[in-house]
Image (cartoon, coloured by chain):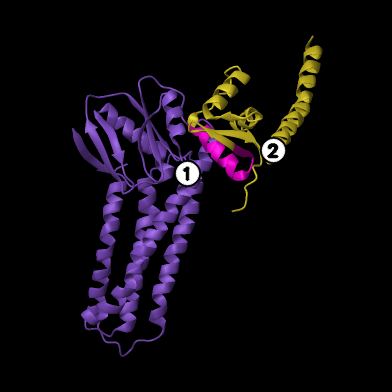
Chain colours: A purple, B yellow
C-alpha cells in the first residue's frame, strides 16, 4: 500500500540525519519508495523491517555503478538529479562511502549544487516582486507625488543582499556541518539562518519603500500585509524541515 | 574549469591510483586493492566511483575504452606524478619516524 507520509526539505549536509529517519521509519513499518527533490517522501506500509539506507551524491552515475553497488549488497531505491538512495536489508555491511575525504568532497559539491538551485529559485521567486512594487501601489491608491529616486534602489539593493546572504549562508553551513561531521539538524539551521532574516529583509524593504513612496500610511500597512503573504510558502517550508 | 591539485592522497586514493598502473575497471579495482593489502583496505563502491570521476576530471587517470558498459581506466602522467609524490611523502614520514624506534630501543637498554 502506497502512502505519502512526510515532506522533507532536502539539504545534502543533513544526509546522515535523513538516512537515520528512513531507517527509523522502516523499523516502524514504512519503507521508503521515493523522495523527490520537492521534498515529498512516499513510503509503503509493510511489517517492521531492519533496513540500512545510504544517500549518495555521486554525479553522472552509470548502470555499471548500480550493478557494482548491487553486487556488494546495496540495492538501488531512487534517484534524481542531485542524489541517489540505496538500501540494504539485514545485517550491517560495508558502507558505500568509506573515505572521509572523498565523502566530504562529495557533500561539498552536493551542497554547492543544491545552494545554486536554491539561489536560482529565490531569484525567480523575487523576480516577480518588482511587478508587485509597480502594480500594488496603484491597486492600493497610493500617492506617487512624493516619489524620489531612492526607493527605486531598494529593490536591487535588497535583492543583492539576499543573494549575497545565501552565498554566505552556504559557506557557513558548509563549515558548521564539516565541524560537526555532517550531523546538524537542518531544521534548526533553516529556522535560524534561512527563513526569518531573508523574509524580514524583504518585508522590511517593502514597508520602507511604501512609506517613502506614499503619504498614505494605511496603504503602506496594507502593502506590508501583502508582502507578508509571500512569507507563507517559507512558513510551510519551515514546518516541513522542523520535522527533523 | 581549473584543475584541482590534491595536496595529499588518502589511503583509498593512493591504492586506486596504484591499482590503475594497469588498465582496470570499477569492480576489478576494488578486488585488486583488497588483494594487494590482504583485506586491510577495502574501498566502498560509492567511494571508488566518486574517486574515479574526480581523478578523471583532474586528469590523473584517463578512460581507455568501454567494454560491455564497463569503463576501463588507466593512470595518466599527472596521476603518476601525484602517486610518486605521495610515495615520497610516506617514505619521508617513515624515515623521520625511525627516530622513535631508536629512542624506544635506547630506553629499553637503559631499563635493562
Is disc 1 surrounded by few (<14), some (14 to 19) or many (20+) residues within 10 Å?
many
Q: In which quarter of the image is the N terminus of chain A?
A: top left
Q: Which residue lies furthest to the left in this view?
A: A1
Element under disc 1: helix
- Mark 2, secondary structure of its residue: helix
Residue positioned 48% across, 43% down in the render: A107
- CA–CA distance in space, label 2 to label 1: 29 Å
**Pointer 2: what residue?**
B82
Q: Is residue A189 visible?
A: yes
User: Is residue A206 found inside the magenta-colored segment of the image?
Assistant: no
Give left or right: position of B37 versus A55.
right
> Range of the magenta residues?
B46-63
Residue B111 lies, with reference to residue A163, above or below; the image says above
Q: In this rendering, would A61 be left or right of A26? A: right
Q: Nearer the viewer, residue B75 or B96?
A: B75
Residue drawn 23% across the image and 33% down it: A44
Nearer the observer, A181 or A96: A96
What chain letter is assigned to the residue under label 2?
B
Residue topped by disc 1: A177
Amino acid at each position: 500500500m502506497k502512502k505519502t507520509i512526510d515532506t522533507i526539505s532536502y539539504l545534502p549536509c543533513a544526509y546522515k540525519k535523513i538516512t537515520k529517519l528512513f531507517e527509523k521509519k522502516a523499523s516502524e513499518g514504512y519503507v521508503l519508495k521515493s523522495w523527490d527533490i520537492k521534498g515529498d517522501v512516499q513510503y509503503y506500509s509493510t511489517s517492521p523491517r531492519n533496513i540500512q539506507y545510504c544517500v549518495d551524491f555521486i554525479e553522472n552515475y552509470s548502470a555499471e555503478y548500480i550493478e557494482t553497488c548491487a553486487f556488494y549488497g546495496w540495492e538501488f531505491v531512487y534517484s534524481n538529479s542531485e542524489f541517489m538512495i540505496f538500501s540494504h536489508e539485514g545485517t550491517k555491511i560495508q558502507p558505500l562511502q568509506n573515505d572521509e575525504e572523498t565523502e566530504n568532497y562529495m557533500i561539498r559539491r552536493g551542497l554547492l549544487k543544491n545552494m545554486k538551485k536554491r539561489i536560482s529559485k529565490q531569484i525567480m521567486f523575487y523576480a516577480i516582486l518588482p511587478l508587485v512594487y509597480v502594480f500594488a501601489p496603484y491597486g492600493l491608491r497610493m500617492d506617487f507625488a512624493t516619489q524620489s529616486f531612492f526607493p527605486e534602489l531598494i529593490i536591487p539593493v535588497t535583492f543583492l543582499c539576499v543573494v549575497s546572504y545565501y552565498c554566505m549562508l552556504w559557506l557557513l553551513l558548509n563549515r558548521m556541518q564539516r565541524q560537526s561531521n555532517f550531523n546538524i539538524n537542518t531544521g534548526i539551521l533553516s529556522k535560524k539562518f534561512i527563513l526569518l532574516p531573508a523574509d524580514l529583509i524583504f518585508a522590511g524593504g517593502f514597508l520602507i519603500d511604501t512609506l517613502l513612496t506614499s503619504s498614505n500610511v494605511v496603504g503602506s500597512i496594507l502593502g506590508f500585509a501583502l508582502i507578508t503573504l509571500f512569507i507563507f510558502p517559507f512558513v510551510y517550508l519551515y514546518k516541513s524541515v522542523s520535522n527533523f | 574549469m581549473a584543475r584541482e591539485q590534491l595536496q595529499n592522497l588518502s589511503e583509498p586514493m593512493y591504492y586506486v591510483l596504484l591499482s590503475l598502473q594497469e588498465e582496470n575497471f570499477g569492480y576489478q579495482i576494488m578486488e585488486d586493492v583488497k588483494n594487494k593489502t590482504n583485506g586491510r583496505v577495502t574501498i566502498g563502491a560509492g567511494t571508488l566511483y566518486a574517486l574515479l570521476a574526480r581523478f578523471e576530471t583532474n586528469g590523473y587517470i584517463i578512460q581507455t575504452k568501454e567494454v560491455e558498459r564497463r569503463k576501463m581506466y588507466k593512470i595518466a602522467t599527472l596521476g603518476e606524478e601525484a602517486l610518486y609524490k605521495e610515495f615520497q611523502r610516506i617514505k619521508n614520514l617513515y624515515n623521520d619516524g625511525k627516530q622513535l624506534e631508536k629512542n624506544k630501543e635506547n630506553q629499553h637498554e637503559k631499563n635493562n
